[in-house]
Image: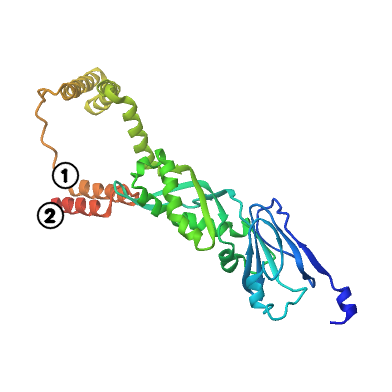
Amino acid sequence: MGLMDFIKKQFIDIIQWTEDADGTLAWRFPMADMEIQQGASLTVRESQVAVFVNEGKVADMFGPGMHKLTTQTLPVLTYLKNWDKLFESPFKSDVYFFSTRQQIDQRWGTQQPVTIRDKDFGAVRLRAFGNFAYRIADARLFHTEISGTRERYSVQDLDGQLRGTMLQHISDAVAQAGIPFLDLAANQVEFAKQLQIATAPEFEKIGLKLESVTLQNISLPEDLQKILDQKIGMGMIGQNMGQFMQYQTAQAIPKFAEGMGSGGGSGVAGDAMGLGAGLAMGQVMAQQLQAGLAGQTAPVPTPAAAPVQTAEDIMALLEKLGDLKAKGILTDEEFAAKKTELLKKLG
């Protein structure tokens, strides 16, 4: 290099990165045609890591602090460039900064219902959403696996990949938590904990640490939501179950009497017949309920023989069972057993 070329050449004596607020994960220091001087100052702020890359190979790494760049502080680069024999100053090297602070409030959620297997209901479908936080834990691994030689790599560039990773492990989280499906909504903290445990190894493979996972909502299928509402209602009733059943019976008697009246004839006679039958049924149910609560056996009229099921009745019942299986309320095994039992009646 001639003297004039040397004079015209620009040299770098300060290397630093004032991190912006736009979610940058990795940033390459702009070198252009410039070179780094011997003894230059490298400033790495808190929640940052600086990495020197020589001809595509990760060399020296620096944590927070101010560093003088010499053969002593750049041992790997010194070895790669053979500076122990002839030190070259200034020199060229790519310098990347990585943000190691937490990237918080990252959203995850199911765009489509996710099918999981539950011990009580078989295959069921749910929707869920929440947020998570992560940070770069291994800058070397993140550089080689993800960001590479790009001038800038942001949170948005990684968003889709991480969302997919979270959703991929929802079924694993439900299985590991061991929480019955109907109790998931009431155990959101445990579910989120298991989702973090199931997903964290995938983050580690690309140099990230999954710091936290929260679950904000679980949406159950409509049919199972009704069952959950009933379960909550039963819990709220508690020891007043007897009064609740008597109330339900009293509410049902007028409707039953109305149906009996319309089927048994019109006018006063039919209404009287229907009302009488309804009251009789209410008395029987009340006697059974009181006997059960008191631990006694009440006299119960002998029920009439069940009507013989016709082929049409059996086929209609099979169709209803098929609908329950399709909705995930019956398992394949339960449906098959009931189907076999009904088909025997046809024979």
Q: Residue at x 81, y 69 (%)?
A: 11
The C terminus, quarter of image: bottom left
Task: Assess whether mark 2 and mark 1 are in contact (beta carbons under 8 angstroms).
Answer: no
Residue 211 picture location, percent across and down: 52, 50
* Residue 72: % across, % down: 67, 69
Residue type at numbered disc 2: Gly
Q: Which mark is residue 241?
A: none
Q: Is residue 180 left or right of residue 13?
A: left
The quarter holding residue 64 reads: bottom right
Residue linked to disc 1: 309
The residue type indicated by label 1 comes to Gln
Q: Position of residue 302 (x, y in %)?
A: 9, 29
Q: Is residue 316 above or below residue 255?
A: below
Dot 1: few (<14), some (14–19), or many (≥20) neighbours within 10 Å? few
Q: Residue at x 18, y 54 (%)?
A: 340
Instruction: Please tell me whether mark 1 sits on a helix, a strand or a loop.
Output: loop
In which quadrant of the rendered view does residue 223 lie?
top left
Would you identify the image quadrant in which residue 51 lies?
Answer: bottom right
Number of other residues with Cα within 10 Å of mark 2, as a class: few under 14, some 14 to 19, many 20 or more: few
Say if residue 27 shows up in the picture: yes
Mark 1 or mark 2: name the one nearer the start of the chain. 1
Q: Up-down: is 187 above or below 59?
A: above
Q: Could you tell me how far apart the alpha carbons at marks 1 and 2 are, in whole angstroms?
A: 12 Å
Q: Residue at x 58, y 64 (%)?
A: 142
Say whether residue 48 is left or right of residue 284: right
> Which residue is disc 2 drawn over?
347
**Nearer to me, 89 or 337:** 89
Looking at the rendered structure, the secondary structure element under dot 2 is loop
Taking depth in this image into account, of 252 and 192 the one nearest to the observer is 192
